[in-house]
Image: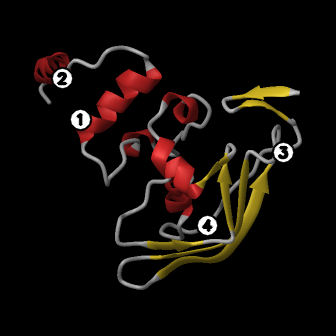
Amino acid sequence: MKKSFSGWTNILEPLIRIAHANLQSGEGKFIWKDLSFQLLPNEIHAIIGESGSGKTTLATSIFGILPKSWDLTFETWDVAGLSWQKMIDQRFQKNLVNNVFLVPQNPNLAFHPYRDLLSQIQDFYTYGLKAKFQKEEILSLWQDMGI
């Protein structure tokens, strides 16, 4: 048995299970059609494709981060025991961010383009460092660095 953020779970249960997912941009362009896969504990998967093929979009969607105008449909969307709606509701709560983490291919692009920088720094302090976020402290540090 393996402990997960939602309690004790069977080690053979998928960490990610997505079935028949379709994603369409706000302009109607399909990002992916009929995407299905699962990731079991201790497995390694690689997602390969050309630039612009939807790899990063898939990675961020696993965290429930998509542009508001986009349309995601699916038969199954389960990430670390959370359905899509539960994930959206809980994505910034301690239990999800302590168990699922995105390591971007290019660390220079680590910030999410659909969220403002200050809120992302606040999330990092609150959920990553488990420290109290002080906006004035961050702004002072940025000023010291010339940002």
> Residue at the location (24% across, 45% down)?
116
User: According to the image, label 4 marks what residue?
Assistant: 49
The answer to whether the residues at label 4 and label 2 have Cβ atoms under 8 Å apart is no
For marks 1 and 4, give the one nearer the viewer.
Answer: 1
Classify 10 Å Cα crowding around label 2: few (below 14), some (14-19), many (20 and above): few
- Mark 1: secondary structure: helix
The answer to whether the residues at label 2 and label 1 have Cβ atoms under 8 Å apart is yes
Q: Is residue 62 or residue 4 the one in the foreground?
A: 4
The answer to whether the residues at label 1 and label 3 have Cβ atoms under 8 Å apart is no
Q: Quadrant of residue 144?
A: top left
Classify 10 Å Cα crowding around label 4: few (below 14), some (14-19), many (20 and above): few
Report how far apart the C-alphas of labels 3 and 4 lie in the structure. Answer: 27 Å
Mark closest to the chain's N terminus, 3 or 2: 3
Q: Is residue 21 above or below residue 117?
A: below
Disc on res. 43: none
User: According to the image, label 1 marks what residue?
Assistant: 118
Q: Quadrant of residue 9?
A: top right
Q: Is residue 27 visible?
A: yes
